[in-house]
Amino acid sequence: MDLARSAQPTVRDQSLFNVVSNCAAGKWRTLNYIGTWLTAAAANQSTDHGGQFQQSAAQEVLALQICQSAASWKGGRGIKINNNDLDLISDKEQIGVEIAFQHLSLAEKYILLGNEEAASKHIQDYLKELRKAAYRLGEKWNEEQEHQLNQTASMLAGVLYTQLEVSRQVRFGRIPKRLTFLLGMHRSGTSALAGALCNRGFAGPIDPLPPNHGNTMGYFESKGLVAINDDLLAEFGFEWKSLAALPDGWTKSKAAKVWRRRVINHIAETFEPGKHALIKDPRLNILFSGLSDWFECMDVDVSVILQMRHPFECANSLHKLHNVPLADGLRLWNLHVITAERSTRGIKRMITTYEELLSSPEQLLERICTRFLLPIKNQT
């Protein structure tokens, strides 16, 4: 089962408010996607600009220009604006968008210099310019929407900091440009799948957990990454088999910020930069959302394989290996699988099953390699 981002986003996804909201959140890949979709839609509509959108033709063009500016700034592509369409908005709107992204560029520079106060000021000016451009075209956002924008923008400095760390590591050749995360409940066959994928071109860590009676062929997990993830869980009083969800807002905590920096540095130390990294640890089922800012960074290609196995089989295996009560094993499956599925929506992903791995492994591996653009290499 291959569930990727929908090929046709909804009308609501294309609204000018939603475009500005994505700007405030630092969602550059999403903006590039919206912009390419709008480009294609405009080409198909010719003069009937507003037919599929709940906004005016001018607002639609402004949304497209904002997406194009974000893409140009962050290395996106595929967004074009027809000169005739651009005439629908004035120089004031066009220049306002240019000034907005100049403020954002300055904000990034101040972040690198460690001047958070100056960075925050330029982020506020960035949002102010986008808002002014939208309001000139008749946009009217209510108090709740304005509050939402301001709240989102207040987190943007931290988002930019994380994205800058990832971008610099990729550009300096310290971490792989392609990262595939293999998620799945404990005892769901992720180790077997990881081993098979590493035989076909994916790169595992240089510090793998050693084999033991639970997995005699090995886990294909980074020993250091497991320790880093355990440290974060411990900050909140959790461990790998805790049955409760992490507290709301944990991704914005100081502990999460330190954890992200440690994860980036550890990937640089344990995965070869020129390879397609396969990153695995069941703890990431519940921690994956803490890395969401990475996925919007245009310099790194993030994808997910989510391995599924029947909950009773997972719970029974946990009971035999770790003496986890069956009821707790089922609750743990529920927490991990639902959290992993929700946190990977909108990301390039593939959902696989343990049954398929056992019954038709070659077909499954070929499908994964084809999906993620890896050459197919038969096992010798």
Image: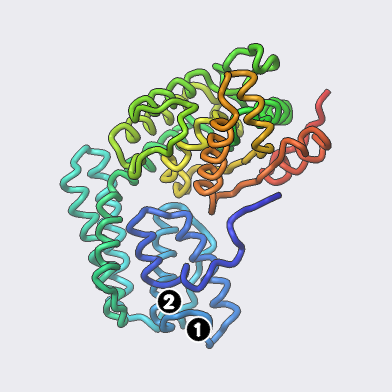
In the rendered view, does 288 fall on the left or right side of 205?
left
Look at the picture and state if 176 lies above or below 116: above
Which residue is at the far left? 117
Residue at 39%, 62% (x, y): give it.
69
Residue 98 relative to residue 332: left or right: left
Q: Are marks 2 and 1 in contact (CB under 8 Å)?
A: yes
Horizontal arrangement in the rendering, residue 286 relative to residue 191 (left or right):
left
Q: Residues within 10 Å of mark 1 (few under 14, many from 20)?
A: some
Q: Is residue 277 visible to us here?
A: no
| Image x and y of residue 110, in percent | 23, 44
- Crowding near pointer 2: few (<14 within 10 Å), some, many (20+)? many
Please, is residue 295 above or below residue 21 in the view?
Answer: above
Q: Is residue 110 above or below residue 188?
A: below
Q: Position of residue 102 (x, y in %)?
A: 28, 58
Could one spot residue 213 in this view of the protein?
yes
Where does label 2 land, which residue?
61
Q: Residue at x 69, y 25 (%)?
A: 195
Residue at image x 61%, y 63%?
7
Q: 301 and 239: which one is in front?
A: 239
Q: Identity of the amino acid at label 1? A: His
Q: Position of residue 161 (x, y in %)?
A: 32, 41
Instruction: Tell me the kind of residue under disc 2.
Output: Val
Q: Quadrant of the C terminus?
A: top right
Counting residues from the N terminus, which is met first, the one under dot 2 or under dot 1? 1
Disc number for residue 49: 1
